[in-house]
Amino acid sequence: MNLGIVAAFAYGILAIAGGIIGYIQAKSRVSLLSGSISGLLLILAAYFQLQGQTWGAISAVLVTVVLVVVFAFRLVKTRKFMPAGLMTILGLLALAVMVNQIVALR
């Protein structure tokens, strides 16, 4: 298992956990739905990477890019580090690991 798979899986778990926390704290169904969907997509992408499907890595990168952009916009809008700033930073780290693994495979 390479680090790109671990990064996709870990960021997926964080997205799901963040959605659940957003729902519990603010009763935000949007947080629950978006966190669950994006987290499950990342976990599925990690699973398909484990199965040897190269498109799984590309899917993980695309979902992570979308999440980083959404959280970066939210950070600029709210100017609150939690959760948008943390998820932006962790997303950028996960993205760097994922892209590094894709480049290393070529």
Image: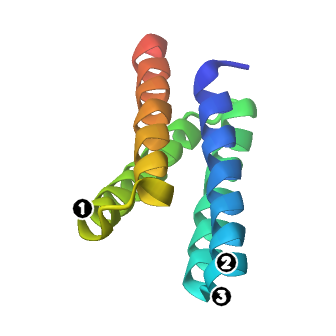
* Residue drawn at (27%, 63%) of the image: 73
Q: CA distance from mark 2 to mark 1?
A: 21 Å
- The residues bearing labels 1 and 3 have C-alpha atoms spaced at a distance of 22 Å
Q: Nearer the viewer, residue 65 or 83?
A: 83
Tag 1: amino acid:
Val
Tell me which residue sits at (43%, 19%) in the image: 100
On residue 76, which mark appears? 1
In this orientation, which residue lies closer to the viewer: 71 or 52?
Answer: 71
To which quarter of the image does residue 77 belong? bottom left
Between 88 and 63, the one lying in front of the other is 88
Of marks 2 and 1, which one's residue comes earlier in the chain?
Answer: 2
In the rendered structure, which amino acid carries the disc numbered 2? Gln
Tell me where residue 36 appears, x and y as whole percent.
67, 68
Residue 88 place in picture, x, y as percent: 41, 47
Residue identifier under label 2: 25
Q: Which mark is residue 37?
A: none
Element assignment for label 3? loop
Relative to 23, does residue 19 appear above or below in the rendering? above
Circle 3 sits on which residue? Answer: 27
| Residue that protrudes farthest toward the left in the picture | 76
Looking at the image, residue 4 sits to the left or right of residue 93; the answer is right
